[in-house]
Image (cartoon, rainbow, N blue to C red):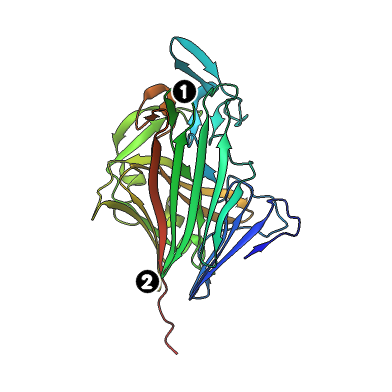
Amino acid sequence: MSTSEWFPTGEQVDLVRDGVSAVVTEVGATIRRLVVSGVDVVEGFEADEIPKSSQGAILVPWPNRVRDGKWQHEGQTLQLDISEPKFGNASHGLLRNTGYAVERLAADRVVLRAPVHPTRGYPFSLATEVEYALTDDGLAVTHRITNRGRDAAPVGIGAHPYFRIGDVPTTELTLRTTAATIITVDERSNPTGTAPVPPEKDLRPGPRVGDITLDDAFTDLEPVGGRVEHVITAPDRSTVTVWADESFAWVQAFTSTTLRPGRIALAVEPMTMPANAFNSGDGLTWLSPGDTLTCQWGISVHIEEQQG
């Protein structure tokens, strides 16, 4: 069911399935809350709050940054609006603050739709759809993007959830990925190349979040059974696994010190392409007129039973 009372993020869509519940917002198609076995597993926000730092947002038609908001297309320089004033970049796509329409709604799933109309720096027309479906142990998220225009359109997809495991301090959690390569960046967080993951950024051993500082993109992930996994673990062995199909070949990991004053917040962001892909072409999908790009990621949760 949905709540029609006025909130800064619009309509609040409540989803429920045995032992799992979620709240998705109209604005940004944002995951505001996900609870599994009574435990909060996303670092969300209250219904009367405005989300910060892209909390839970869908990042379309590009995740991460476009350097200076500029990119080249058919011999022309296109200029996107600068949405990251600190670094002078265009950040996280065009739909973070867009109201999505609820297309279909059931007790445990919702499909939301939003158009991308031709705009400054992005002269293309897309129909975008995101489906949130509760599972036995969490959430599956399916993206469908259709090119409604007459020309091929550049498309990338990302998501920006922050995670927690109940009241466990984020510093006590561990984060493990299989990434062998890191994206190197300049002082404005724009890519300069790639390198083997250095020891202080290596997430393969599963370091404590409190022992590392992250605002980094990684790639060369090792899929298992057709999907990649990024695993967050609490001291009691409860886990939150961020999984994605192989189209999400990049992941951004970010430890924020500003989302919640006095606390670390951990974002794990699956991405189909890295920053500045409109210029580099890395992972960029050129979607032909009438074609649809479909990809999926999700969250699987295991909560250890407390011994009493």
Name the residue tied to disc 2: 237
Q: Residues within 10 Å of mark 2 (few under 14, many from 20)?
A: few
Image location (x, y in percent) of residue 277: 41, 28
- Tell me the CA gap for discs 2 and 1: 51 Å
| Residue at the extreme bottom of the image, as rendered | 308
Nearer-the-camera pick, 10 or 64: 10
User: Can residue 207 be seen in this snapshot?
Assistant: no
Residue 290 sits in quarter = top left
Give the residue at x 67% y 60%: 46
Q: Is residue 173 left or right of residue 223?
A: right
Q: Amino acid at mark 2?
A: Arg
Q: Amino acid at mark 1?
A: Arg
Label 1 packing within 10 angstroms: few (<14), some (14-19), many (20+): few
The label shown at residue 150 is: 1
168 vs 1, left or right, is left
Label 2 or label 1, whichever lies nearer to me, is 1
- The residue at 33%/42% (across/down) is 247
Q: Position of residue 33 (x, y in %)?
A: 57, 62
Residue 128, how many percent across, how many down? 51, 41
Would you place residue 163 above or below residue 248 in this image?
Answer: below
For marks 2 and 1 on the same chain, the one whose residue lies earlier in the sequence: 1
Say if 112 sits above or below 154 in the image: below
Could you say whether the residue bearing mark 1 is in a helix, strand or loop? loop
